[in-house]
Each structure stands twice: as C-alpha cells, then as structure tokens.
Amino acid sequence: MAGKGAATPATYSPSLTTVKGKKKPPIFADDANWVRSDGRHFHQCRPAFLRTNAVNSASGSAYAEFGNTKVIVSVFGPRESKKAMMYSDVGRLNCNVSYTTFATVHRNQGSDSKELSSMLYKALEGAIILESFPKTTVDVFALVLESGGSDLPVIISCASLALADAGILLYDLVAAVSVSCLGKNLVIDPILEEESHQDGSFMISCMPSRNEVTQLTVTGEWSTPKISEAMELCLDACSKLAKIMRSSLREPLSASEE
C-alpha cells in the first residue's frame, strides 16, 4: 500500500434545525438509559478516515475507515474488453464486492456479495461519464476488510473516491449514508448491533454538488414523516461527507507538490 491520508479521522454530522433544543428520547421504550455503544448521539456519524492511492498496482484506489468498518477499493481500466462485442458509444462498468474471511463471522458472503455488487453498480453508474471511454470497461473491486455496520454506504463512498483517483470522469463524487429506524427514533450511520435490532433501514447515495440521488433503498415500514426526516438527515450528512472526500483527493496532490 502507498499514499498519505488525513492524520486524524474527520467527523461529519447532519445539522437539523428541527432537532435543535430537543432532548432525544431513548431508542428502546423499555430502556430509558439506553445509549449508543460507541457513545455517539443518534444523529451523529462515525469519524471518517479516507485516503487514496492505497494500491500501487491499480489505476486508482481508496481506503475508507468508518469506525470499525474498513473497506479498500481498487479500480482497473479503462481497458479494452476481452470479449468481442459490437461497438458501443458508452463505456461499461463492472462492480464486485467481496468480504475477507475474517471480516465477520456472521455473514453469508455468497448471496450478500452478489446483491451488494449490483447495488454498488446502480449507485455509481449515474455518476460516471460513460461516454468518455467508449468500447472499454472499468472494473471496480471492493473488499471489506472489517464489517462494522453500514457497509454498503462506506463501500459506495470509497468506490467513488477510487474512481476519481483513477482519473475516471465523473459528474460528481458519490457519497452515501444510511439511517436505521429503531422504535420511534432514527439512528444515522448505524453499527452492526443497531442494524441487528432495526425496524427498517433507509440509505441514500447522491451527488451532493448536483443535488441528484443515484440510489435510494428502503426496507421495513416507514411513515411519511419518518421518510422525510431520514432523507433530510442523509442528504445533509452526504453533503458534509463529500467535502471530506474532496479533501482526501487534494492531499496527495499537495504532498507531491512539496
């Protein structure tokens, strides 16, 4: 591995005027003393550590560490497709997500990896200027080194950073954040323990500079007010995360100039 990143993780938390001055109720009604195991507030994201140029052999790469969730993404290409195919005016994107054997002991890697690969593709496709590399393919390989919760949002954000590091033309970076519904409350950037007790999940991947959502996934039962609150939380957090991502792209450039 190579490359330099921020010396300390950067934090990013949505700031909603609707929640200011209000005392946050407990997640579980039968436990008034319940707090998040990592000490965060309900609407506080984990510190994010990001760096690019993490794999020397790749066209571009990035490493992301959000709490105990650790992901590394390598990008290869654009390369000419190995299969004989008709000429295409746009490039092709291949995405693959896998877990190390030691990432977690409670995961069915086969089915999850296939589903996550598809979701990663959908989140990134709309942000890539495919017309910039016709009749070629870009491969994105994401490896989860440690699964600590909110794996997919971290994978998407890290993969977007790796694409930018590879020089792939993008409309904008893609940042992703998820929220879990626990009882009457919403918890942003949930860890594994919180995901295992959630009543529903909500995830957004978006291009903050363009105010465009590339993917939205919702599971469980949600009321309209809760959906609106979750969307506001995620979009605000995505905007702040994108600033950290851009900063990590500028740091290697500054280091090389020195």
Image: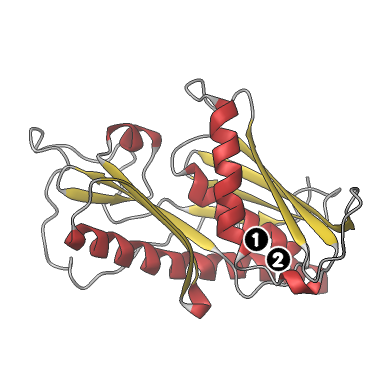
Mark drawn on residue 161: 1
Q: How is the image coloured?
A: secondary structure
User: Could you tell me which quadrant the C terminus lies in?
Assistant: bottom right
Q: In this orientation, which residue lies closer to the viewer: 141 or 256?
A: 141
- 81 vs 112, left or right, is right
Is residue 146 visible in the rendered structure shown here? no
Kind of residue at badge 1: Leu
Which residue appears farthest toward the front when viewing the image?
Answer: 86
The residue closer to the viewer here, 61 or 230, is 230
Q: Does the CB distance between marks 2 and 1 fall below 8 Å? A: yes
- Point out residue 252 in the picture as x, y percentages from the top left corner: 74, 65
Left or right? Give the position of 240 relative to 222: right
Where residue 108 sits in the image (x, y, percent)?
52, 24
The local secondary structure at tag 2 comes to helix
Position of residue 251 relative to residue 122, above or below, is below
Question: Residue at horizontal 34%, vertical 40%?
Answer: 38
Which residue is pictured at 60% across the width and 67% down the height? 126
Residue 77 position within the rendered picture, expressed as x and y whole percent measured from the top left = 84, 57
Q: Residues within 10 Å of mark 1 (few under 14, many from 20)?
A: many
Q: Tell me if 185 is positioned left or right of 50 in this view.
A: left
Q: Nearer the viewer, residue 182 or 4?
A: 182
- Which residue: 38% across, 50% down? 189
Disc number for residue 164: 2
Q: CA distance from mark 2 to mark 1?
A: 5 Å
